[in-house]
Amino acid sequence: MAAATQFGNTRRRTYAILVALVLGIVCGLSVHVWAPAYISAAEQVSTLLTGLFLRLIRMVIAPLVFATLVSGIGKLGDDTLVLRVGGKVILWFLAMSFISLTIGLLAANFLQPGAGFSAPLPADIASLKHPFQPIDFILHIVPTSILDAMSRNDILQIVVFSVLFGVSLPAAGKAGKTMLGWSEELAHIMLRMTDIVMVLAPIAVFGSIMGSLAHSGPEMMMHFGRFLVQFYGTIMTLWIVLTFIAFCVIGPRIKELIKELVQPVLLGFATASSESVYPLLLERLENFGVPSRIAGFVLPLGYSFNLDGSILFQSFGAMFIAQAYGIHLPWTQQALMVLVMMLSSKGIAGVPRASLVTLVAVLPQFGLPEAGIALILGIDHFLDMLRTATNVLGNGYAAAVSAKWEGVLSDGPTEDVL
């Protein structure tokens, strides 16, 4: 019943975003063609609507990242299963995150998805932080005050503090268990709050599309279409790479696994929510021969630490925004950006458009305007659908690989043997 309700809510929001997208296109083109005198007014309305949405997003960044990371790491505990399976699967997650970020970065540099947008730089561009030099970057990652880091939404410092805090919980005994319970409750509250903020996404979509088309006219539609095609092509490349790596571990049975994962992947694509796919994905993995104890451990962990599609979007989206604003990022800065995103992406929750939250937090670290998110908002639902499908595929592979490594992957449904 809960899954059905969630699917219904997601479907209604999808319709709302599509309606807002169409209205934004119609209003923006109408202003550009028939009422050019009102272009400035349309841009002001766009700035207001998207600005309010971005402020709400920034408002939830610090507590959301802190709560999801602390609860996710704290639940690892220190039992035998965690030490044996958790250590291996976390290394897998880190490797896949690096591969996803690298593919997104290389594709964005090769395809130049932001070329042709010519977005005007915001007035406060000079106030943005400039990219760190290596020594400054290393010193900067450790916060002198977590309250100061949270007040500035410094995502990297928040992540470092949250990881250390979560790792310390098991050693704190009863106090650690109490804090873990509080962090889990805070995570639930912040996810719900994020969900409420996302209700306003259609308004921001209308504003961003209307303002962009009023300013640039019909040619902007061609740029958006090209961006979608390029992003989908990049994601398909990631699918091929992930499948090949999984084949190297699982062997010829990868064909059976792909057949089992087709339905969960399609459901993830339709709902744009990894959470709604969890029961079906667990069932399909068990049908493939992954013990429920392995799948039940790897999947929740993967929903916080192994969202391959969302992670690829971080580097691809950041480079798109840099190109759209004509900001050049040298390779050294891009490499630093990948390292930052390796950490910050671990705070992404498996809810629709949550990856936008982390991207908004990372952009200022490299001198990129947060307002660039407005360029993506109008088509982000279509991006999020494939991001989510990729997340489901990646976590399905991770669970099967973990079972194979443990020597408990059977030829079909079976009881746990751990």
Image (cartoon, rainbow, N blue to C red):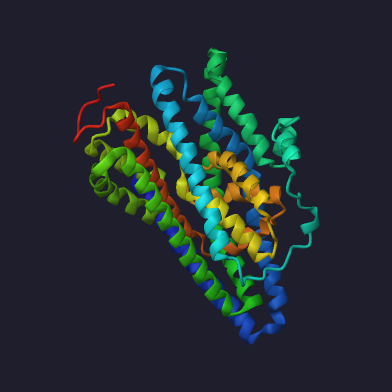
Quadrant for the N terminus in the image: top left
Q: Residue furthest right?
A: 126
Which one is nearer the viewer's eye here, 19 or 301?
301
Q: Residue furthest bottom?
A: 34
Q: Quadrant of residue 114?
A: bottom right
Q: How many marks?
A: 0
Q: Is residue 356 above or below residue 62?
A: below
Residue 188 spot, x, y in % from top left: 51, 36
Residue 3 spot, x, y in % from top left: 35, 45
Which one is nearer the viewer's eye here, 71 or 187?
71
Q: Is residue 387 left or right of residue 105?
A: left
Q: Residue furthest top?
A: 173
Q: Is residue 110 left or right of residue 150?
A: left
Residue beneath the point at 65% across and 35% down: 158
Residue beneath the point at 35% across and 47% down: 244
Residue 197 spot, x, y in % from top left: 57, 50
Residue beneath the point at 68% across and 83% down: 36
Q: Is residue 393 visible?
A: no
Q: Is residue 293 left or right of residue 337?
A: left
Residue beneath the point at 54% across and 12% down: 173
Q: Is residue 368 visible?
A: yes
Which one is nearer the viewer's eye here, 164 or 203?
164
Residue 176 spot, x, y in % from top left: 55, 18
Q: Is residue 377 above or below residue 137?
A: below
Quadrant for the C terminus in the image: top left
